[in-house]
Amino acid sequence: MKMTRLEFVLLLLPLLMVLGNSMLIPILPEIEASLGLEGAWSGFILSAFTIPAAIVIPAVGVLSDRFGRSFMVKWSLYLMILGSLICVMSGGGSGLLFMTGRVIQGLGAAGTTPLAMALAGDLFSGEKRTGVLAALEVSNGAGKVLAPILGATLAFLLPWNHSFWVYILVSFIILAGLRKELSVEKRKSGSFRGTGRYMRDIQIIFKKKWMLLVPLYAVGGTGLFVLFGILYFLSYHIENTFHIDGFFKGFAFLFPLGAMVVTSYWCGKRLKEGNGGLYMGTGVVLMVAASGGLFFWDSLSGLMFLLTVCFGGLGLILPVINSEVTGAVGEEERGLVVSLYGTSRFAGVALGPIAYGRWKEDVTSMYGWTFAFVVALALTYMYFQKEKSAQ
């Protein structure tokens, strides 16, 4: 089926969000050295982007329910451009200026993936909606595959701070597409309810569905916590233990992230009403088995194989969660409900590098924490399935 220009614009939004961190992973040591950052502070290179986004996303969701999705997306892109320009100017070695730019980038990122998902829910229905949501997850995963390679390549060709021109370029491309394609997304005059009624409706939704929504939020957030934590660890482990650097280090990320893209695409093509539990269950089993295997197979080939299996499993889980969360509510409340899911994802992305930055010195203990979080994810999934069957 031919992709419309609108769908293409939507797919660029999660790609931009993913570039925000994944493109920097191979060059973290270079940024750290240039800015004089040490130890756990280097984890904040990633988290300075994701923590502000996680905090602001719910407010963006509420405002998008009030003023429209496209309005909030445009202002988010303006912030992304401003933050990226500040990061470019920080190449002289100003850590404070760099972190300021990253925070502003993060505020802009709050209006990317969550609003793309909300827009997909608003503009499409049925299997078309499921397909577009799966495509958003594939775009997200493809960005994770390509971004480290792009980051490593740009770092080889240019000073690290010039990598941030990529965010500016992608933002302008999206803005150009928004000018026409999202003009279809207009809230009818007078359709917005008062704040009091809006909050009452949200309260009713969560009173009825919190036992379904909260486990989905937790599974998505935990999965991305493990993903970005492991990627952060892998960036240092490959360089310091196996002495692989530059482009080839970026290429190493292709295997686990590529598996996630392939399984997300495969799942999205086959996902229909009623079969999501099968794909989620399979993904959970793969993640538990692979994370448990880390204790016994720690060679480079073994590590890459197990991470490939683990994140292949995550690729089966995320499209199902996207579909469940987006379809759980109507258009008028979707902005907040989907944005809270986005907050849980961003929280995982933000906290993963911080936690793994502390754990990476004791690899065995880090594997233990990884296994514990994946088991918690599995138990939460089992609870979700039980509650869904009961309703």
Image (spheres, rainbow, N blue to C red):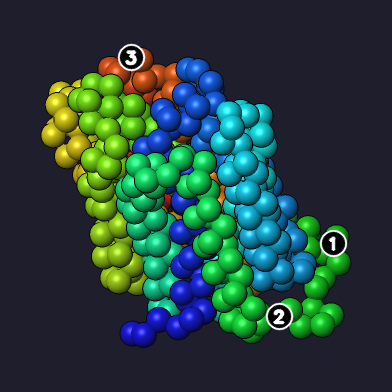
Q: Amino acid at mark 1?
A: Thr
- The answer to the question of whether label 1 and label 3 lie on touching residues, with beta carbons closer than 8 A, is no
Q: Amino acid at mark 3?
A: Asp
Question: For residue 119, which quarter of the picture?
Answer: bottom right
State how far apart marks 1 and 3 are (Cα): 50 Å
Sequence-wise, the earlier of marks 1 and 2 is: 2
Find residue 173 and report its horizontal and vertical position in percent. Answer: 54, 69
Which residue shows up at 53% across the image and 21% down it? Answer: 37
Q: Amino acid at mark 2?
A: Lys
Sequence-wise, the earlier of marks 2 and 3 is: 2
Res. 346 in view: yes
Sequence-wise, the earlier of marks 1 and 3 is: 1
Whether residue 340 sits left or right of residue 256 in the image: it is right
* Residue corresponding to mark 1: 195
* Residue corresponding to mark 3: 362
Secondary structure beneath label 3: loop
Which residue shows up at 72% across the image and 52% down it? Answer: 59
In the rendered structure, find residue 186 and report the number of the disc placed on it: 2
The N terminus lies in which quarter of the figure? bottom left
Find residue 216 and report its horizontal and vertical position in percent. Answer: 48, 50
Res. 306 in view: no
Find residue 239 and report its horizontal and vertical position in percent. Answer: 28, 27
Whether residue 389 sits left or right of residue 75 in the image: it is left
Which residue shows up at 46% across the image and 51% down it? Answer: 19
